Image (cartoon, rainbow, N blue to C red):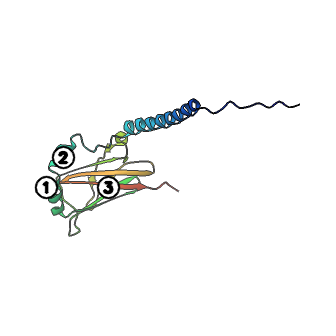
Amino acid sequence: MSKTTERPPLTGRKVTWMFLGAFATILGANLALIYAAIGSFPGLETRAPYNESLTFESRRIAQEKLNWSSSVSYKNGQVILDLTEATGTPVVTPNITVTFGRATSAKYDQELNIYFDGRFFVADVEVPAGNWQVKIKATALDGTDFRRTLSLYIRPAS
């Protein structure tokens, strides 16, 4: 003889608890992801975004009038910044700072000790492969600020 066991009936109370359990799981996962996102990178580029935005348009127009072009590369342990005027001649600037770091975290940011080799701005730095960001701040001879953020992808050594 075989015994048949009957399952208890599916009641409204059980369905309610299953429904609430599923939503609690989803809510818990969302809260964990929100906490991780906020804690890892706030997304701010400046400490005073409102104040920066007030003068953004005038700074952008002044920078465009400089008509400078910029590019960055990495070769043999050196970050090479090509900063040229519209004529193709290297930019002469009284001061230039270059910050090198990851795009998503300020943890790896470092200000590079940069020098001019007669054609390019060069900095010696050993970094692992990956996606990096190069932030340039320079001042033209007429006092106009130049700011640019460039992406740099360093391929793994093969």
Q: Position of residue 75 (x, y in %)?
A: 40, 57
- Which one is closest to the eye, mark 3 or mark 1? 1
Question: What residue type is disc 2 on?
Answer: Glu
Which circle's residue, 1 or 2, is located before the other in the chain? 2
Q: Is residue 155 or residue 33 the one in the foreground?
A: 33
Image x and y of residue 116, in percent: 26, 56
> Which residue sits furthest bottom?
87
What residue sits right under mark 3 in the picture? Answer: 150
Which residue was labeled with disc 1?
A: 58
Q: Amino acid at mark 3?
A: Leu
Q: What is the secondary structure assignment of the residue under circle 3?
A: strand
Is 53 left or right of 79, judged from the image as shown?
Answer: left
Seen from the viewer's position, the closer of residues 122 and 149 is 149
Frontmost residue, 127 versus 77: 127
Query: Mark 3 or mark 1: which comes first in sequence?
Result: 1
The residue located at (13%, 55%) in the rendering is 58
Please, what is the three-letter code of the amino acid marked with disc 1? Ser
In the image, 34: left or right of 147? right
Q: Quadrant of residue 144?
A: bottom left
Does label 2 or label 3 sit earlier along the sequence? 2
> What kind of element bears circle 2?
helix
Picture quadrant of residue 154: bottom left
87 is higher (above) or lower (below) than 128: below
Q: Hey, which residue is sitting farthest left in the picture?
A: 142
Would residue 8 appear left or right of 26 to someone viewing this image? Answer: right
> Which residue position is annotated with label 2?
52
Q: Secondary structure at mark 1?
A: helix
